[in-house]
Structure formats: structure tokens, C-alpha cells
Amino acid sequence: MTSTRPGPDWLADAVLYQIYPQTFADSDGDGIGDFAGIAAHLDHLAWLGIDTVWLNPCFASPFRDAGYDVSDYFTPAPRYGRTEDLVALVEAARRKGVRILLDLVAGHTSDRHPWFLAAAEDPSDHRYIWADRRVDGFVASPGSRPGWYRPNFFDCQPALNFGYARSSSDEPWRQPVDAEGPRANRAALRDIMAHWLGLGVSGFRVDMAYSLVKDDPGKVETAKLWTELRDWLDGSHPEAVLLAEWGDPAAAVAAGFHADFFLHFGGEDHGLPLRSLWQNNGGTVEEFWQQEACYFEAEGRGTPEPFLDAWRSAAQLTEDSGHIVLPTANHDFSRLAAGPRTAGQLAPAFAFLLTWPTLPAVYYGDEIGMRYLPGLPDTEGSVLGPRFNRAGSRTPMQWTPGPSAGFSTAPPERLYLPVDPDPHRPDVLSQRADPTSLLHTVRRLIALRRAHRGLGSGGAVEVRHAGYPLVYTRAGRYLVAVNPRREPAAVRLEPGGVRPLEVQGVRVADGELRADGFGYGVFELV
């Protein structure tokens, strides 16, 4: 029977940090980040209070989709280093109290993977989905095998065959989930996971986790697949975790994942809960998105209700069985500092992120207010639409002042992506020296969350005011107020005393809470 426990105890207190390895830190001067560069900056993560790091794919790849086109699941891409370098990073991180999660691309490979190269020559090979006639969305065979294959995202990413939930005599490529090819692929996932868990990683974030079984109403068969893997994981590696890229926490946790993210897509609302918080029409924008102004905007036209409603529903359905992850951004979605939102407006966003009962996930550089950089060229498949260029969220980490921001010693023209050219761009070194900086604010809020368990993922929450400011209590002991708009805001409170714990521009007196523009406050009720 599948375990419904939320997972290892450490996960409930985790503060996650996502690293895009291409642009975090370059140790060898080739213009691309690497394992040794990450290892050299572990002190930054430990100082900040981060205890769990998720690395974007770091396996061998032709990099037509930034590493999400894997050609060898057991070998790191040479640009990052060798297996020994990755293991050294994992061990060095563990010594500093930081766990490393890898990105598992489960639903497809590169079209340069040996599995696919073999399948393109062998009509009896069913590791991928092959049709004997032209089918909408399928891609012509590149080898001697006649027919067409089904991609999972880009054409260069052929879908691994995990079967179809519904068969059809007219479409013989719709193999059942227990056919030979799907069984081989399920076994391969377990082998890949076991290999890296055996080398010390603490789990995986699973790319497109919802996509494995095709034509799967309600994702029933996909859930069975992941439930089977979760059963194995609980028995063999009980301290390891699986995080889903699903965008529907209730569905993903029910499918066996320890946690899932609110994302810019997924669920019945197609990502509206997250976008209603952060998406301000700057950065990555899908043309079909329909939404009102987001809540965290200076003009104060938004409402937190879409997020609150979705969170309440997901929290009820995942209670005692898994976690919800709330990210600042990711490699596919705009940074917090995008469009008109500046780094100076981000403190209330972090106050919310680090006091709401979800697992917080900080995208690298957001802790200093790095901005989404518009107008970059298509880089390793970054462009998905006229207004959706993911490269703007993938620029080099800004460690120090100077031409390459301390990311690399390579000349600017050799960098994977250009450094933000703004002469006033933020950097870690400068903000470390300034106790009033965003970096110090984030560090204090992380420390506060750890010092007061009622501010973490497990404490109860009661919303007192769902406007400007947003006011809520945690665990019946703490009062939190955030005002992400430019104008001050005020709300009446029930009588009672408060003790400030971490406050910037918020006052409570005579039964009224008053918040300056871009203010926040965390108080203990007395």
C-alpha cells in the first residue's frame, strides 16, 4: 500500500534554492557555469539559510533545450565537470547542511540519445512512440525505420513510451502501460534514480511529471506509475524526495510526489494562482493568458484571492500527505524583478513567501533582486513565443561589481548569456556589506522562519484582511502584514498587543495596523 506520509522530516522545514548551472558560477573561465563554481559559493547559500538546492539538468546533452534534452542520464555534461566533480559538490554541500536535488527529465530524451538512435533503425524497438503513418504532431523518422515519432516538447525531444491509457485498433502505436517498452522505461527511471541516490543526492525534481502516460484522462495511469516509484523510494531511500513539475499540487501529491509547485501553468486555473501574485506583464508572457492585475504590484490594483482560494483547496487536499511549493520564479518564468517591478519593491514579496505555510523556493539571484533581462537572443531553445523568452531569467549570477559581475573570467562575448548591463545592478558582495539590503532582509526572514516553527509550512493560517495590506495570523501566535503597493494602507485589528520580530514600515497602535508603501511586518501576539 502506498505511503501517504509527507516524507522525511527535513522536507517540512526546507528552504529551497534553484540553481541554473549554466549561469551560477564559472570556475574555469570558459563562460559557462560548472560544478566547481557552485561548490565555491556554498558559503553564500549556507550563510543565507538555504538547506536544499535543486540543479537544473546537468547531464550529457546537445543542449537544444538547455539540457532538458538528455543524451546520457548517467554522465554529467562535460561543460559542468565529471561525475567526480558532481559527487564532490554533493559531499561539500552536505558538510554545510545543504542537500542537492537533481532534475530528472522523465518523459523524453534527446534525439541523440543512444536509445533513440537505435530505435530509429529498428522497427521492433518500442522505447519511444512510433506511428506507421503521418499523425498530427508526430515527426518524421530520422533513420532507416519508416514512420513518425511523437515528441514530448520540442521535436528534438522524442517522448519515451510509457503507454497510452486508452487504446484504439486504428492507432496501434497506442500500446498499453504494461507493454514491453513502457515496462523497460519504468525500470530505467528506477535505475537512474538509484544511481544518483547512491552517489549522495537527496532526490529529484521531475520535469513534466504529468506527461508520461499519453491520453490519460485524470492522469490516472500516470499517477499509478509515480505511486509505484514512490513505494520503491520509501522502501529503499526513505530520506529522499520527489518534487513534481505538475503545477497542480493536489494531483501531484495524490500521485505519490512529496511536493509540487504552484507554477505559471497547470491545474484547473492554468497557472493563475501563481501568476495572480507575481505576473505583471513583464518578462515571460503567453499570449493567451487572461488575468487581472497581479497582487504584488506598485499600483495596488490586484487581489490575493485567486491565490488564496487555490491554496486553500490544495492545502486541504494535501494535508498530512505532501507539501506545496511556492517559488519566486524559475528558469521558465519571469523573475520577481521584471517589467515595472524593481528590486526595491521585493521585500514584502519575500516576507509573504517566507511566512506563508508553503515550502519557499528562491530562484538564484532573486535574493538580491536580479532583474529579468529583456531582448536577449534565443539561447539553447529559450524562446517559446513572441513575448516568452526564457533567457531573460537565466542571466549570470551577480556576485560582485565589475564587467562580468564575478561570474566568470571569460571575456563578455564568451559568456553563456550577457550580464545585466545596468551599472546599478545589484550584487552579492555589495549587499553583504549593507545590512539594509534585500539580501540581508531575506536572510533575516529565513532565520525568523526557522526560529519560529509557527511561521513554517505546518502552522495554521487565518487571513484577517485580503486586500492592501494582506494581513494574516500564523499558528495563533504571529501576525503578518505585507503591503506590496506604493501607497500606504491601513486596517483595523482586534485589540491586543504585539511584539515586533521583523518589521519594515509597519506600525500597530490603538487597534489599527498601518503599513507604508512596500512595507511588511512580522509580529508575535502578546
Image (cartoon, rainbow, N blue to C red):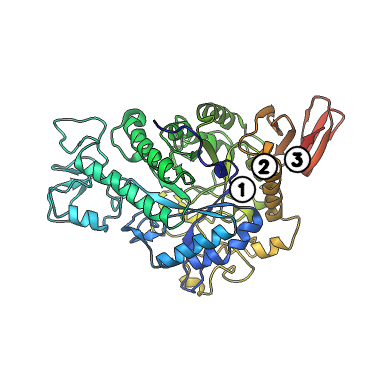
Which amino acid type is marked by label 2?
Ala
Callouts 1 and 3 close, C-beta under 8 Å: no
Farthest residue, direction front:
235
Question: Residue 466, relative to residue 346: is it above or below?
Answer: above
Q: For the residues marked 2 and 1, what is the alpha-carbon distance in whole angstroms? A: 8 Å
Query: Which mark identifies residue 227?
Result: none
The spot of residue 357 in percent (x, y) is: 61, 36
Q: For the residues marked 3 and 2, what is the alpha-carbon distance in whole angstroms? A: 18 Å
Q: Which dot, 3 or 2, sits closer to the camera?
A: 3
- Is 437 or 114 nearer to us in this picture? 114
Write down the residue under mark 2.
298
> Are there few (<14), some (14-19), or many (20+) residues within 10 Å of tag 3?
many
Using the rendered image of the protein, determine whether residue 51 is visible from the camera's viewpoint: yes
- Is 271 or 523 nearer to us in this picture? 523
- Is 189 or 486 nearer to us in this picture? 189
- Quadrant (top left/top right/bottom left/bottom right) for the N terminus: top left
Quarter-of-image position of residue 45: bottom right
Write down the residue under mark 1.
340
Query: Which mark identifies residue 521?
Result: 3
Please, what secondary structure does the residue beneath circle 3 have? strand
Quarter-of-image position of residue 280: top right
Which amino acid type is marked by label 1?
Pro
Please, what secondary structure does the residue beneath circle 2 have? loop
Callouts 2 and 1 close, C-beta under 8 Å: yes
Farthest residue, direction top:
494
